[in-house]
Amino acid sequence: MDLASAPVPPWYRDFAWRDGRLEIRKTAIRLRLDHHLMAEIASWVVWLAILMTVATWARLTRRNVKRLAFVPDRPRPWYLLGGAARWAGIECGGRQAEADAVVYFDDVTVGQPPASLNARRLNFACTDISKSHIASVFEEVFGYPLLVNPETAQGDIVAKSETNGVHDGRIVAAPTERRAGFCYQRLIDTAGPDGYCRDLRTPCVGGRPVVVWVKLKPQNSRFAIHNRKAVLRDPAEVYSPEELALITAFNARIGLDWGGLDILRDRDGRLYIVDVNKTDVGPVIALSWRDKIISMNRLSAALKRLIT
């Protein structure tokens, strides 16, 4: 069977309720159903209504039909790739042989794409997004390390699970015993004069940054999934030409054709790529409606160029 044409189960089967938390079945990640999450769900309902309206208009007014096939999973509308494709009027799903490109879409940390005869394959080389692999590729491309040895380091460092998307980072005092399944990184000081830490979420298409979402968080919740505020910036406003070239080289090395990078800029000016999201959700909820729409226009246009 052509995996890309397999029936897609209803969206609600993606979730389960276990032990008082909302569980994402694919990754087994559990979310606490608090007022922050409820507010974000409400915002997403409004956003999905906007997305479906734009997608319907895009389908009705398009001239040339573009198609994307996905293996082994097809992205739901809340995944940024699915949203950008629909925003552009691109058909999602169907047989690989009829698609303009096939995307390896699997929300796992380490995986292996199934075979595909389609000549245009996206993200098929991006099979390992564990934190230690990301850090290894980062050091190879940028020339300076992110990882530290927790048993010999001195002072505060960051401990994170190797698993993608769990948001369990925490500051620990080194030296400390190494735990299986965790990686250890230097503590990057991203706080601005206002006291907020800044994450540079950078969606990339064709390996190149398209937009930057500057996410602000209080220092005591810098690893949390929720953002106090987010603003849209052009990549050229945030990164130098040399940094943009290094980011593109990093994406090529790790095999990322589409996805979002989590990038931090230390107080000393250096950049650190700390996470790769090949099945990223978005746009960031804390963005203004204007910034969301501008972002989707840019990302959907870049996606169309990528598969043309």
Image (cartoon, rainbow, N blue to C red):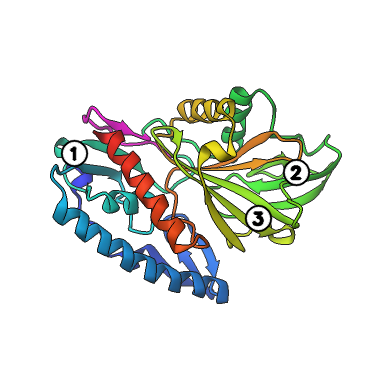
The answer for how far apart the CA atoms under marks 1 and 3 are is 38 Å
Residue at image position (58%, 29%) is 243
Q: Earlier in the sequence, mark 2 or mark 1?
A: 1
By secondary structure, the bulk of the magenta-drawn segment is best described as loop
Q: Nearer the viewer, residue 236 or 201?
A: 236
Q: How many marks?
A: 3
Q: Secondary structure at mark 3?
A: loop
Image height check: is 191 above or below 252? below
Is residue 13 visible to us here?
yes
**Residue 237 at x, y percent in the picture:** 56, 39
Q: Secondary structure at mark 2?
A: loop
Q: Name the kind of residue labelled 3 in the image.
A: Phe
Q: Which residue is mark 3?
A: 223
Q: Nearer the viewer, residue 289 or 124?
A: 289
**Residue 163 at x, y percent in the picture:** 55, 47
Q: Which mark is residue 36?
A: none
Q: Which residue is mark 1?
A: 99
Q: Which residue is mark 2?
A: 187
Q: Is residue 199 left or right of residue 252?
A: right
* Quarter of the image where one finds residue 221: bottom right
Which stretch is magenta? 111-123
Q: Earlier in the sequence, mark 3 or mark 2?
A: 2
